[in-house]
Image (tube, rainbow, N blue to C red):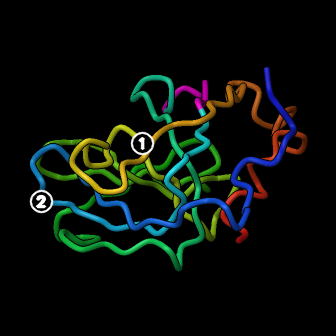
Amino acid sequence: TTKSESTQPSHPAELQVTLRGGCHCKKVRFEVDTVSDLVVLDCTCSVCRMRRNTHFVVNSAKFRLTAGGEGDQISTYTYNTGQAKHKFCKTCGISSFYTPRSNPNDVGINVWCLDEPSEVQPPWSITKTILFDGKNWEQNIAQSGIQDMGKE
């Protein structure tokens, strides 16, 4: 099931925050500028389903890698069309962010790789989860609203 509503609305009342996160061993760390009330996607494609990639998408200009680096601590996995670039830590194997096939100029952030909401002020929260039928990507992407994410 997909929903075609806008996924990351930009309203003046939303609290803009800088969130931090990374992999399990903390060798890969990042910062992302976003809203504290997150709308996330729960994709059912083979990779997202297996690694529980519940994620939100931001413009790449709002994402900063603060530890680790491509080729240094981060490796990239691609499959199928090769458009999605799944990044993971070479030490612990956690994929905390990736380049989505739907939004190749943006970054998908795995919400479970953010620092705990209780550890940051103001805390972040998930306000809505949108199930995306990624197994049938081609049939569902146009009406999903995913490609509008990150276009703030």
Reading the image, the residue beneath label 2 is 27
Asked whether the beta carbons under mark 1 and mark 2 sit within 8 Å of each other, the answer is: no
Mark toward the start of the polypeptide (1 vs 2): 2
> Mark 2: few, some, or many residues within 10 Å (few <14, many ≥20)?
some
Residue under the image location 80 percent in, 27 percent down: 2
- Amino acid at the residue labelled 2: Lys
Question: Whole-percent x and y of residue 21?
Answer: 28, 55
- Amino acid at the residue labelled 1: Val
5 to 97, vertically: above or below: above
Q: Quadrant of residue 18?
A: bottom left
In the image, taking residue 131 as reference, residue 69 lies left or right, namely: left
In the image, taking residue 53 as reference, residue 27 lies left or right, namely: left
Residue under the image location 65 percent in, 53 percent down: 101
Q: Nearer the viewer, residue 121 or 76?
A: 121
Element under disc 1:
helix
Q: Quadrant of residue 24?
A: top left
The outermost residue toward the bottom is: 61
Q: Nearer the viewer, residue 16 or 110?
A: 16
15 to 95, vertically: above or below: below
Q: CA distance from mark 1 to mark 2?
A: 18 Å
Element under disc 2:
loop
Residue under the image location 42 percent in, 47 percent down: 124
The dot on residue 111 is 1
Question: Whole-percent x and y of residue 81?
Answer: 65, 48
**Range of the magenta residues?**
42-47
Q: Is residue 149 magenta?
A: no
> Mark 1: few, some, or many residues within 10 Å (few <14, many ≥20)?
many
Residue under the image location 58 percent in, 55 percent down: 57
